[in-house]
Image (tube, rainbow, N blue to C red):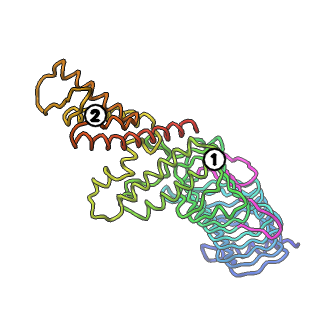
Amino acid sequence: MIGVDKKLFGKYIKESPHDVVFFDNLKFKDCVFAKDTLKSDKPLSFRGSEFTDCEFNNCIFINAQFGNWCKFDRTVFDGCSFEGALCDFTSAQFNCESYPFEQCNFYLQATSESEKTKVKFTDAAFDVPRAIFRLCYARTDVFTLRALRLSSRVSTPTLELFVANAGFQILVLGLCIDKADLIDMDNIRIQGHFIYQQLEYAAPFAPELVLSRVNFASMASAQFFDANLKRITFNSSSIETVKFHNCIWEREDGYCLLPKDETIARTDPQLAEELTRLYVQLKRNYESNGNFIDAGDWFYREMEARRNQLLARSSRWPVWMRRSLSLISLYKIAANYGQSFTRPLIGLVISVIGFALAYFYGGFTLGQDYVRYRLCVCPPTLDSLYDFGRAVGCSLSAVTLQVGRVSHLEGIVSVFAYLIQILVTATLLSLFLLSVRRRFRR
């Protein structure tokens, strides 16, 4: 390799009449860019340029622009610093035998309060043997890896991201992203390992994390460690194989929740369907890892999403009827989707008393006595209370499924009520046993 003539570069940069110094669509081969070679207060643009067997050593870039299909063959950035409000590697292509970025800092600062700093690797492609970043640090408002592609012909590379909220430089094995409000990894394609870890400095910190249209099943592995995922988006992604270790999710009513507006889901059938698919995958994910507590949370959300699907779907039945009288709504009322064993017990008590009233006024026979009372507003007597107690005994016979007691009921109303009670009792007992089973699995 040969060193680049810094006097020649310096003269060109100094005499450039433009606000941006252009090195676009050039070809560099066997070049070493040293610390002071590209020193400039102006943004440098290398859009569409090609670098072959080059090194950038300790260079300082302000608003660096390496986009527009810029190619890097066996080229590395070692100890470089990217400053300004923008660092753009959009559509860049890397084919390296080591780390493309090693000990680099993406330390961006906005020039105004309304401006957001951005590091962009949108649609960038990396063919590297190990990883993209090594011992790198980034402080920016937005870090974009949208549609990034990571692969290798000789090994299994890793995209390793650490998130912090410390305000000072932290050295990690891969890339530490500090104080970012948005990390956009929409439609990334990785034929290797994906690791996302939140450092202890950022425990309550939750950046907006976009991981839509990502097929995690095609990766060698995908893992989240100690991550605050309250602002994550998984739309159209396959997440059943992802490993979540000690992650923090948004919670509502005591159950985990993806950060989507459930109110909107009730009127948007597509959103309700997408939420259902994601909740099913999260439930299976946690069940396969033996975490039945959190799996129960995702099952609850799955059922809520299915209920929202029913509400969002066009129907001749009014919304209030679909909200309150559908089977899935009754399942929620009776057992909170199998999460509560007290609700079926309370339902059994209410059914015993309610059907006892039906027998009390519909008529029943105990021994030689036929008992039937008329509906009236009058104070109870000792005899009426005694007879109501016997009606409760008839009702309890249905709870214990003693069908032979039907012969002691008189009138079509009482017999019909008895058959209905047997069905209700069998349903509530099944829901109770299902809820107990779920509780023991936890």
> Between disc 2 and disc 1, whose residue precedes?
1
Q: Name the residue under label 1.
A: 164
Q: Does the magenta stretch include residue 424?
A: no
Residue at 72% from the left image edge and 65% from the top image edge: 191
Give above or below for 123 relative to 375. Answer: below
Image location of residue 243, percent across then percent down: 66, 51
Q: Pick the quarter of the image with the C terminus.
A: top right
Give the x, y percent position of residue 183. 58, 57
Quadrant of residue 248 within the rendered picture: top right
- The amino acid sitting under disc 1 is Ala
Farthest residue to the top: give it: 382
Stretch of the chain drawn in magenta:
150-179
Residue closest to the eye, 14 or 52: 52
Residue 408: mark: 2
Residue 217 at x, y = what percent?
66, 62
Crowding around mark 2 (Cα neighbors within 10 Å: few <14, some 14 to 19, many 20+) is some
At x 64% / y 44%, what residue is drawn? 290
- Examine the rendered structure and indicate whether residue 229 appears above or below residue 154: above
Viewer-closest of 182 and 102: 182
Q: Which residue is drawn at 60% across and 73% down?
A: 19
